């Protein structure tokens, strides 16, 4: 199981339908974070200050792509920043709005797919809080997303896109069970059932089994997760074709990333 697929998936529990993994697997209560750690979405995790600093430097308004249920979007709104969110899962956005209401925050979120953006305003800052861009299944879809980002980017604006280069899962890790405890005391379990890797289209598909053991009958469900990765040169070519110039490529420590780094963050601007 690749690092992104395992950790991202491990922060979800079972929910209603939808055509996207985030629609079928809700975030676990914050207790689950002690299971996956701050790196649930790559090094840096959902540390809101990373994105708050980016928005303050670039200026607002800002747009978070793949905002899910509101991390770090709601923390940025709490700081008074003009940030909106987009997600393909209506279920996640409902949860985000509920969390905002409970915190007394106003939030604007849009139910749209990243590759089909059509929003009424443009933004000085566009970002993803973690490598969710890897969930786009192929280069064609990625190109559509990048073109949409460019259309919604104000003159002089900047884009922050973290990416992950997954490694094959060691054979001894297949079937390994990880556990966490939800707020209600239920035990959450996640394990890798199988993994397929195809170097030509640059995809890795993991089938994960999720279990919830608490009051009542256990819940068990299996879901496939497809990751699509990008060598640095390929991503820079896709970005350039969309009218975006690479400003920097950094690693988790903020220094220049090696071309084969497992995690790298691209900072882009309009060409």
Image (cartoon, helix red, strand yellow):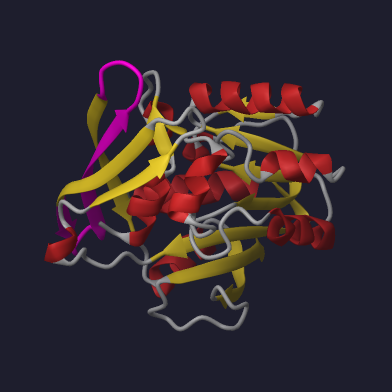
Q: Which residues are magenta?
A: 195-218
Choose between 244 and 2: the one closer to the eye: 2
In the image, what residue occupies the spot 20% across and 54% down?
176
Residue depicted at 48% across the width and 61% down the height: 42
Left/right placement of residue 92 relative to residue 103 reads left
Is 42 located above or below residue 192 in the figure? below
Q: Quadrant of residue 63?
A: top right
Q: Is residue 203 magenta?
A: yes
Picture coordinates of residue 223, whole percent (x, y): 25, 35
Q: In percent of the image, x 39 and y 18: which residue is there?
A: 16
- Residue at the extreme right: 80
In-image side of 55 versus 191 (left or right):
right
Query: From the viewer's perspective, is 236 left or right of 195?
Result: right
Residue 166 is covered by the magenta coloring: no
Q: Is 213 situated left or right of 38 in this image?
A: left
Asked if 121 appears above or below 256 in the picture, the reply is above
Give the x, y percent position of residue 102. 73, 23
- Residue 44: give x, y in percent of width and height: 58, 63
| Residue 52 versus residue 119 in the image, above or below | below
Q: Residue furthest top?
A: 216
The quadrant of the picture occupied by the C terminus is bottom right
Q: Is residue 136 visible?
A: no
**Quarter of the image with the N terminus in it:** bottom left
Q: Is residue 103 visible?
A: yes
Q: Residue at x 36, y 48 (%)?
A: 140
**x and y percentages locating residue 81 in the rendered image:** 83, 45
- Provide the major secondary structure of the magenta segment: strand
- The foreground one among 189 and 9 is 189
How many numbered markers are drawn? 0
């Amino acid at each position: 199981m690749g690092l992104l697929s395992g950790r991202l998936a491990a922060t979800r529990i079972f929910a209603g339908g939808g055509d996207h993994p985030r629609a079928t697997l809700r975030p676990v209560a914050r207790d689950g974070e002690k299971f996956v750690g701050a790196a649930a979405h790559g090094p840096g995790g959902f540390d809101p200050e990373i994105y708050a600093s980016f928005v303050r430097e670039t200026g607002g308004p800002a747009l978070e792509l793949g905002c899910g249920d509101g991390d770090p979007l709601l923390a940025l709104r709490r700081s008074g920043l003009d940030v909106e969110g987009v997600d393909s899962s209506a279920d996640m956005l409902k949860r985000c709005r509920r969390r905002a209401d409970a915190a007394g925050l106003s939030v604007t979120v849009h139910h749209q797919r990243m590759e089909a953006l059509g929003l009424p305003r443009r933004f000085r800052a566009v970002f993803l809080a973690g490598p969710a861009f890897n969930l786009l299944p192929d280069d064609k879809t990625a190109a559509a997303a990048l073109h949409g980002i460019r259309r919604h980017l104000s003159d002089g604006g900047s884009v922050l896109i973290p990416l992950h280069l997954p490694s094959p899962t060691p054979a001894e890790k297949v079937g390994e069970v990880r556990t966490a405890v939800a707020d209600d005391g239920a035990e959450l379990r996640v394990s890798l059932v199988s993994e397929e890797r195809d170097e030509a289209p640059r995809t890795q598909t993991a089938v994960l089994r999720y279990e919830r053991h608490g009051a009542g009958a256990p819940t068990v469900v299996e879901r496939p997760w497809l990751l699509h990765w990008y060598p640095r040169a390929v991503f820079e070519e896709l970005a350039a074709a969309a009218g975006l110039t690479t400003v920097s490529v950094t690693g988790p420590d903020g220094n220049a990333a090696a071309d084969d780094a497992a995690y790298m963050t691209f900072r882009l601007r309009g060409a």
